[in-house]
Each structure stands twice: as structure tokens, then as C-alpha cells.
């Protein structure tokens, strides 16, 4: 008006207000112990405020969707307000909680033996109840009690059904069923009555220890039980039959208990069996004399491998002793075994040795001495290669011609037993070695032979190699040929005696030095025992 304008402002505040979606908008009935959310909240707003009451059965009282755990009936109130208290809404609903009336009276665990029964009683509460599993119920005692006979450890249940809220309440007891395996005792071997000293096993059928974890055993009495202190609690035991005894085993497993027994009758025959021990020479035979006052049956002899018996089932066999040993007779008297042993001993042999050089050069006599302790009671006989030499006494000399010769002595000790001892003598046969190169004159220094000849040696060290201490110059042999030939077959040296051969070749022929070349040598000799020595080879002459 009159060209004038006017303005004004109005502020409008809008609070976000999102109300939870109740999962139970009406009064409801639920089962004791049930858990469920009272609301859902699918909205993004985080400013709306909530207050649930009472809060004692809720997972939270200031959240939009608390979890309710049904413990008792209650009235739930919900107050919802916006951030600035501009908006508000209240809800109220009742939750009726049906109480669990399923209660089994008495213990929570029962322990019985297989085949036994237990009575299960429930509290006399109103409602619909069932026991299960029904297959183990063997009797209905009254409206609240049943008799249960399970065949294995199990849980037994009482179930209460409330159709109003689809409730199924349960209570349970655990019934542990103990049992025992087949406890029948059997004696092995089954020979009742038993002979004195017989080993008997008292056993029962095997069982799986995992099925009977608490099983325990106790044997009485201790008579004849092997290691009673260690074995009295075993399932099976071993005994030595010494007298007639009734053995009792008491077994428990949990509430199960069983006692089994077995009687072992023992026969102890009165028997004496006398056998004389004897001492004989190696290889000697003698008749065995067995004395018994009882009628022996089922006679059988066994012996060491060193003894040979003329029979195995006779009373008095002949034994041949091939060494120290024992022979045992076993027999039966009234069905019980008896045995005795004869020990056969061979007198300890005297120590004997033939002393002398075990290596001698060809052509030398062997000089031997018999060393015997204790001294023999007879003459000492000497043998060469198993043949009697006709010589007796403590010493013996002989000229061997073979490379190896056996010498033996034979004598008798104070018990009349004959012994032998043997020594082997090696005759060292001369060996001949020839060089393959030589250098006459002084032009090659000191490392090569100046004259071509040979070396005679004895293999004292038995290694097949020429050692410096094995060279000899007194070996007995005769040279029949020692020739050296040039490449045209012309003999530049020709010897037929030992002296010429030992002197060798100096590299000259007809007083003229022969040229550097390869030559052929041939050597033949005869040893004192008639053996022939032949050698042939190349030699190189160096200038």
C-alpha cells in the first residue's frame, strides 16, 4: 500500500518418528524358556527414543528390538518418543508364560547292572506327560511312576505337551548300565587232575576292555599263583599245581558283581629215579643204568647232539660220548611225567704244542719239539703227513721236500684218552727275478744295473713280493742254461754252470760293446728237490 511491502517468517520443526513393528501386537501365551524379539526396526532413523518396561526379562530396555526370555508372565509397556519430545506413542500387551511342569523326582543319574530295573517317578503336576523311549519301559507302576529296564546306558526323558502354546517341556535322567562279560573259568590244559608242578592257566573268554572300563578282578587264595602280588588282580592267571585248591575270582564293574570258582585237583606221585653221572674219553661208549622203584611207562630218551644213544625208548641204552653233554629220560607214573638226567663229561684235554720253525729254506732239516702239559702217560709217536715215522720222544728231525708238510704227535693222558696235535711246516722254495733293463758303463748314474744277471730270494714275508731282506746267495741249485741272444738269434752269452750265470753279462760280445737294443734271455736251473726253474724274457741294453 502506498508502494510499501511487508514480510514475515514461520519455522516448522519436524521430528523423525519411526515406531517399531511389534512382533506381538496382542496379548499372547508362550512357553517357559522361549526367546524371541518383541519388535523389528527396519528404519534408518536413529533419533527415535524407546523405553521398554519391565526390563528384567529383556536383552535391553532402550533399543527398538529387545529379545524377550520367557521366565514368568508379565505386562510389557513400550513408550516411543521423538528426539525433541514432539511425538509420542505408547503400547501395552500381556505375555502369559506357561510354566514347565516336567519334573523327574529323585537322582539325576542312576547306575544299574545289565538286567536290573530302576523306577522313574515324575512330580504330580497337572498337564499331559509322556515317558520315552517307551521300548525300555517294562512296567507302569502308577500314574506317575514307570519301571525302566534299559540294555545300554542312555538318557530317559519326561515330556510335557501344552497344545495352547505348542510347548514341549522336558526333564531327563541318565541311566548308566554296567555289565560283565562271560566270566566262565576254564583250566588249560584240561587235564584235571593235574600232576605236581604242572603249569595251569585259568582263563575266561576274551572281552573288549573299552566296553568295561571300570572292571576289576580279585583272585584268592594265593597258593601256587605265579607272582601273586603282581597278578592277583588279573582277569586270567597262571598257577603251579602244588596241592588241590579251589580258586575264586571276584569281579566287579560299577554296580555289577560276580564270583566264579574252579577247583584244581593235584596228584603228587612218590617216585625216585637214580642215574649215575660218568666221565669217559671222547668217542667212548658205555651202558646207562637207570634205577626206579616205580613202573615206568612211555619211556623216551633225549640227549645233547654230542651224545649218541643206541635207543630212545628202552630203559638202559648205550651212550657214545662225542663231547660233554647230557641225556634225559622222561617217563610217566600214573599218568604224571617224571624225568632224570645223566651228565656225561669228557676230561679236559692237556695243552699240547709242537714247537719249531714253521718256515725253513729248501734243503734244511726241520727240528721239532713236543710241548705237553701235563706230561703224557705214554710214549709220544711222530707222524709225517699222517703216516707213522717210527720215531718216538719229545723231539723229531726230518728233511721235507714238499712246500708244505704236516707233522703230528700222538699221546695218551692219565685217563687213558688219546690225543693228537699237528703243525704245518712251509719249505721256502727259491725264486728267481730278472731285471728288464741294464746299462753297462757309468753313463747312466747309479740307478740301473751294470751287469745283467738275476736275484735269488725266499718269500719269508709271504706277500709274493721281493723285499730287500729276502735276497739269499746260498740257495742250492744248479744252472743248466743261461743264454742271451740279439735280435738275429746270435748268442752274445751262453752259460751252462752256476758261476757263469751269477757273473752275468757285461754288455760285451767278443770284447766289443754291444749296441743299445732289446735282447732275449733264457734261463734253466734245477733245485735240490728236483724242481725245474725256467725263465724267459726281454731285456733292454742302454748306452
Image (spheres, rainbow, N blue to C red):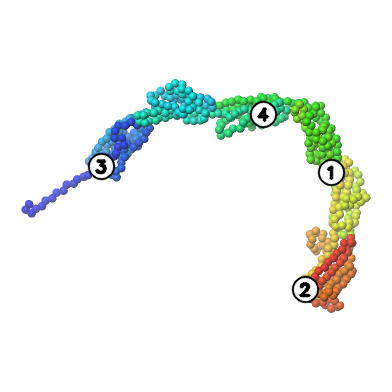
Instruction: Give the Cα distance between marks 4 and 2.
Output: 100 Å
Lower position in the chain sequence, tag 4 or tag 1 = 4
Dividing the picture into quarters, in which one does residue 477 lie? bottom right
Instruction: Give the Cα distance between marks 3 and 4.
Output: 92 Å
Left or right of 371: which side holds 36? left
Residue 378, image x and y in percent? 91, 44
Which residue in the protein does label 4 denote? 187
| Residue 58, visible in the rendered structure | yes
Instruction: Give the Cα distance between marks 1 and 3.
Output: 124 Å
Q: Which mark is residue 445?
A: 2
Q: Nearer the viewer, residue 4 or 203?
A: 203
Residue most extreme to the left: 2
Placement of the C terminus among the 4 image quadrants: bottom right
Q: Which mark is residue 349?
A: 1
Q: In this rendering, which labeled residue sits more in front, label 4 or label 1?
A: 4
Residue 16, image x and y in percent? 25, 43
Residue 34, image x and y in percent? 37, 33
Which residue in the protein does label 3 denote? 17
Lower position in the chain sequence, tag 2 or tag 1 = 1
Residue most extreme to the right: 390
Q: In this rendering, which labeled residue sits more in front, label 2 or label 3?
A: 3
Amino acid at each position: 500500500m502506498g508502494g510499501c511491502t511487508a514480510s514475515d517468517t514461520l519455522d516448522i520443526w519436524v521430528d523423525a518418528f519411526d515406531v517399531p513393528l511389534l512382533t506381538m501386537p496382542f496379548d499372547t501365551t508362550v512357553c517357559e524358556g522361549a526367546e524371541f524379539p518383541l519388535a523389528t526396526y527396519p528404519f534408518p532413523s536413529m533419533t527415535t527414543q524407546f523405553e521398554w518396561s519391565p526390563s528384567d526379562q529383556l536383552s535391553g530396555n532402550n533399543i527398538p528390538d529387545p529379545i524377550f526370555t520367557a521366565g514368568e508372565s508379565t505386562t510389557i509397556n513400550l513408550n516411543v518418543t521423538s528426539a525433541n519430545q514432539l511425538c509420542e506413542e505408547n503400547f501395552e500387551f500381556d505375555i502369559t508364560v506357561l510354566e514347565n511342569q516336567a519334573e523327574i523326582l529323585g537322582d539325576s543319574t542312576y547306575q544299574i547292572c545289565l538286567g536290573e530295573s530302576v523306577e522313574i517317578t515324575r512330580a504330580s503336576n497337572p498337564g499331559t506327560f509322556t515317558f520315552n523311549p517307551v521300548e525300555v519301559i517294562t512296567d507302569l507302576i502308577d500314574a506317575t511312576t514307570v519301571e525302566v529296564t534299559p540294555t545300554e546306558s542312555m538318557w530317559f526323558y519326561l515330556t510335557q505337551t501344552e497344545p495352547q502354546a505348542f510347548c514341549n517341556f522336558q526333564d531327563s535322567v541318565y541311566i548308566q548300565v554296567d555289565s560283565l562279560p562271560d566270566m566262565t573259568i576254564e583250566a588249560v590244559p584240561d587235564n584235571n587232575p593235574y600232576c605236581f608242578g604242572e603249569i595251569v592257566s585259568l582263563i575266561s573268554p576274551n572281552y573288549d576292555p573299552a566296553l568295561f572300563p571300570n572292571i576289576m578282578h580279585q583272585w584268592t587264595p594265593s597258593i601256587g599263583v605265579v607272582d601273586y602280588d603282581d597278578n592277583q588282580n588279573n582277569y586270567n592267571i597262571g598257577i603251579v599245581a602244588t596241592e588241590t585248591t579251589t580258586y575264586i575270582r571276584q569281579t566287579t564293574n560299577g554296580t555289577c558283581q560276580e564270583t566264579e570258582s574252579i577247583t584244581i585237583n593235584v596228584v603228587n606221585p612218590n617216585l625216585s629215579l637214580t642215574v649215575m653221572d660218568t666221565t669217559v674219553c671222547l668217542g667212548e661208549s658205555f651202558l646207562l643204568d637207570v634205577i626206579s622203584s616205580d613202573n615206568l611207562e612211555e619211556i623216551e630218551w633225549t640227549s645233547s647232539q654230542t651224545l649218541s644213544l643206541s635207543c630212545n625208548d628202552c630203559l638202559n641204552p648205550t651212550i657214545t660220548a662225542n663231547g660233554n653233554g647230557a641225556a634225559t629220560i622222561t617217563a610217566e607214573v600214573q599218568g604224571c611225567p617224571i624225568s632224570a638226567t645223566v651228565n656225561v663229561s669228557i676230561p679236559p684235554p692237556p695243552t699240547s704244542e709242537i714247537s719249531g720253525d714253521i718256515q725253513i729254506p729248501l734243503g734244511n732239516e726241520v727240528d721239532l719239539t713236543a710241548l705237553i702239559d701235563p706230561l703224557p702217560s705214554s710214549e709220544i709217536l711222530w707222524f709225517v703227513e699222517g703216516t707213522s715215522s717210527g720215531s718216538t720222544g719229545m723231539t723229531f728231525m726230518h728233511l721235507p721236500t714238499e712246500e708244505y708238510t704236516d707233522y703230528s704227535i700222538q699221546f695218551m693222558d692219565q685217563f687213558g684218552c688219546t690225543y693228537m696235535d699237528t703243525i704245518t711246516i712251509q719249505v721256502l722254495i727259491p725264486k728267481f727275478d730278472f731285471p728288464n733293463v741294464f746299462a753297462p758303463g757309468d753313463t747312466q748314474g747309479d740307478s740301473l744295473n751294470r751287469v745283467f744277471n738275476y736275484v735269488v730270494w725266499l718269500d719269508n714275508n709271504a706277500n709274493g713280493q721281493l723285499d730287500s731282506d729276502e735276497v739269499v746267495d746260498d740257495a742250492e741249485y744248479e744252472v743248466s742254461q743261461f743264454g742271451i741272444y740279439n735280435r738275429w738269434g746270435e748268442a752274445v752269452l751262453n752259460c751252462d754252470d752256476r758261476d757263469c750265470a751269477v757273473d752275468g753279462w757285461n754288455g760285451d760280445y767278443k770284447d766289443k760293446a754291444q749296441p743299445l737294443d732289446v735282447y732275449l734271455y733264457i734261463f734253466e736251473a734245477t733245485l735240490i728237490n728236483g724242481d725245474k726253474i725256467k725263465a724267459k724274457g726281454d731285456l733292454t741294453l742302454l748306452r
